Image (spheres, rainbow, N blue to C red):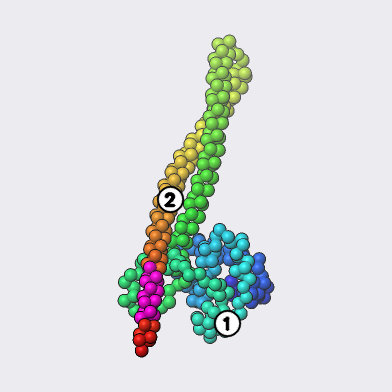
Amino acid sequence: EHCKHKSAAENLVSAQKLLEGEELALAKVAVLLLYHTSMSCKSPGDWNEFDYKTQVELASILRFVLDNEESLNENLETFLQRKAPLSSPSASSSSSEEHSPLLSLPHKREVRFLELQKIASSSGANNMLAGPPSSPMGDVMQTPQFQLRRLKKQLAVERENRDELEVELAENRKLITEKEAQITMMQQRIDRLALLNEKQAADQLEPKEMEELREKNESLMVRLHEALKQCQDLKTEKGQMDRKINQLSEENGDLSFKLREIASHLVQLQEALNELSEEHNAALAQSQEKQGQLESELRAALQEK
């Protein structure tokens, strides 16, 4: 609804049809725009212009795309085609979650990266007073999974820019080589004309022929200076491109380091998840064993009575 224009054009697309999955192709485009907009967004606070309910829906879509990147072609249509009756503006956040197609999917009992990050970074937050609700889109954009995907995209863009600059640099080098060959040929022609000029002067050529040779010599000198100037400009441009490529290489190294750091953090979080699962299973087994003992003691006490 926030994507509709406030002009008469808003009648072209029905928001109800989008939510009910009838405009499937347009819904896919909307999901694609949301994904690329979030990847390009530099400040998570930019999403605060949307109300909390809308942010919850957008965050659910973005989280679904991140969780289903490998099987998006198979699962996206099913996800978008789930029916969602529009709730009234006065409905509470709990009722909106019940009717939302994005939140009505069967939830798996798993710990998301967002939850792991909250566990790792908020050990002392329980003692603070409850503040206003956080930004759901901001929370998703701060997860290691989202940050890792954004770094991969930035790294791919930097590599593409570097490849384009390297191709342009190779073309400029080829052009410089051609210009230098032209300069060499022109210098040889000038040398031959100079020798011919000296020979004709020795043979006492007519003044008219000497004047023509002089004009040709001057014309060639002008062209030589122009070619030298072009060659110098190309060399200057080549130096600038070399510096830009070096800068891109340094930025590429920084992005690669961040990528490795995020990957290491993900491994640590997965290990923490495994430890928590083992502790949970051990506690569950111990609880079941204790429950069995208590039931046995209870039956024995009842029999004694």
Magenta span dominant secondary structure? helix
Q: Secondary structure at mark 2?
A: helix
Disc sitting over residue 87 in the figure:
1
176 or 11: nearer the eye?
11
Q: Position of residue 29 (x, y in %)?
A: 61, 64
Disc sitting over residue 125 in the figure:
none
Q: Which residue lies at the image location 38% right of the left edge and 68% below the top edge? A: 282
Furthest toward the bottom, the residue is: 305
Q: Amino acid at mark 2?
A: Ser
89 or 262: nearer the eye?
262
Furthest toward the top, the residue is: 203
Q: Amino acid at mark 1?
A: Ser
CB within 8 Å, label 2 to label 1: no
Label 2 vs 1, first from the N-terminus: 1
231 or 206: nearer the eye?
231
Q: Position of residue 115 (x, y in %)?
A: 42, 68
Answer above or below: position of 93 versus 243: below
The quadrant of the image that shows the C terminus is bottom left
Indicate yes or no whether the magenta region holds residue 293: yes
Q: Which residue lies at the image location 38% right of the left edge and 79% below the top edge? A: 296
Q: Which residue lies at the image location 62% right of the left edge and 73% below the top edge? A: 82
Give neighbour class at mark 2: few <14, some 14-19, many 20+ (Cα, 10 Å).
some
Q: Is residue 208 left or right of residue 109?
A: right
42 or 128: nearer the eye?
128
Q: Position of residue 226 (x, y in %)?
A: 54, 33
Furthest toward the front, the residue is: 304
Q: To which quarter of the image does residue 199 belong?
A: top right
Answer above or below: position of 213 versus 68: above
- Residue 156 in view in this figure: yes
Residue span colored magenta = 282-298
- Residue 233 in view in this figure: no
Disc sitting over residue 256 in the figure:
2
